[in-house]
Amino acid sequence: MTAYEMYMVFFTSIIAISAFYGLVVQFRGMIEERRARESEILMRITQRWDSEELIKARQFVARHKDNLREAIEEYQKQNQEEYFLLTKVANYFEDIGSLVHRGYLRKNLMMDLLGDSANYYYNLYESYIETTRQKGDPDLYERFEQLAKK
């Protein structure tokens, strides 16, 4: 091997090592970016859960937990504001489920944050969801269901 060839091998190796190092640094940056994005989304989710609006909705759902499906259907027929209040919690979990489904959040991270809340509320809404799906809305709260069913 000539000196020129040795220099070429040496510099090619340096370039390859530098490119690999650059990829590692870029990958680490992407991981940190994802964590920062997830942290921001998690903070917003927590703020929304603790908002006065959602607390009021959760309290209203709790008052109707024994007949939630019937209450939702009755308020919906009458086109009353209470319908929107009763579905607000399910919509909250549907939004989170959509973020998980689209890859903006990892499911295990959300389950750590939510604990059993998604499953608890899904069980409350399940009768309404199943009845409405049978009536012609087969995708109703599909992401909520996926989130709740670990």
Image: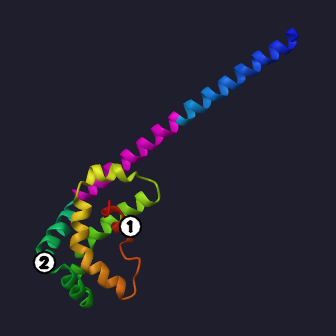
Q: Is residue 19 left or right of residue 63?
A: right
x 11%, y 74%: residue: 63
Q: Reply above or below: 142 against 70.
A: above
Per the image, the residue denoted by label 1 is 143
Q: In the figure, residue 51 lies in which quadrant?
A: bottom left
Q: Is residue 84 visible?
A: no
Per the image, the residue denoted by label 2 is 66
Q: Amino acid at mark 1?
A: Arg
Q: Is residue 25 left or right of residue 90?
A: right
Q: Reply above or below: 28 against 43.
A: above
x 32%, y 63%: residue: 149
Q: Quadrant of the C terminus?
A: bottom left
SS at mark 1 in the image: helix
Which range is magenta? 28-50
Pointer 1 or 2: first along the chain: 2
Q: Reply above or below: 13 against 120.
A: above
Q: Residues within 10 Å of mark 1 (few under 14, many from 20)?
A: many
Q: Position of residue 143 (x, y in %)?
A: 38, 67
Q: Position of residue 22 (x, y in %)?
A: 61, 29
SS at mark 2 in the image: helix
Q: Reply above or below: 13 against 52.
A: above
Is residue 84 covered in magenta? no
Q: Main secondary structure of the magenta part?
A: helix
Q: Position of residue 57 (x, y in %)?
A: 20, 69
Q: Residues within 10 Å of mark 2 (few under 14, many from 20)?
A: few
Q: Which mark is residue 130?
A: none
Residue situated in front as seen by the camera: 110 or 91: 110
Q: Position of residue 109 (x, y in %)?
A: 34, 49
